[in-house]
Image: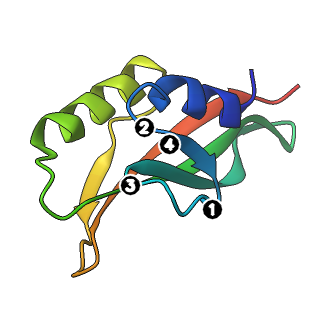
Amino acid sequence: MSLNTLIIKTLNDIAPVYPDVCNDDSQERYFVFNYNSWGGEFADDEPEHDIDFVQIHFFCPLKENTVSLRNTVKKRLRDAGFTHPSYTNITDETGQHLVFECEYAEAVE
């Protein structure tokens, strides 16, 4: 399963999930994710794993209570094999913007 598919499958029943950007202006609540990869656990000058640094952004209305949602997102990501996510709130006057950051390791084929 690709990393994109895993992230979408993990969070899609909370709100729609989009890689990189959401082009649907009708959505009030949604996730957007992106990630960077690098090699890790080298043996014989070759990486054994790709390490993915993942950012998952959640957007929703200003007045929505997101306390329970934050805990649910963290738990689901851990249960799906990601490291425990950090959380940053970068909300502004137009809406809530919550950022979860974690890592995921995939074996190199």
SS assignment at label 2: loop
SS assignment at label 4: strand
Sort mark 2 into few (<14), some (14-19) or many (20+) by Cα contacts within 10 Å. Answer: some
Q: Earlier in the sequence, mark 3 or mark 4?
A: 3
Give the residue type at disc 4. Glu
Q: Earlier in the sequence, mark 4 or mark 1?
A: 1
- Determine whether label 2 and label 4 are within 8 Å by CB: no
Residue 12: in sight, yes or no? yes
Q: Which residue is under mark 3?
A: 28
Q: Which residue is under mark 4?
A: 103
Q: Residue at x 38, y 50 (%)?
A: 29
Give the residue type at disc 2. Ala
Q: Which mark is residue 21?
A: 1
Q: CA distance from mark 2 to mark 4?
A: 21 Å
Sort mark 3 into few (<14), some (14-19) or many (20+) by Cα contacts within 10 Å. Answer: few
From the viewer's perspective, tell me whether residue 85 is left or right of residue 52. Answer: left
Q: CA distance from mark 4 to mark 1?
A: 20 Å
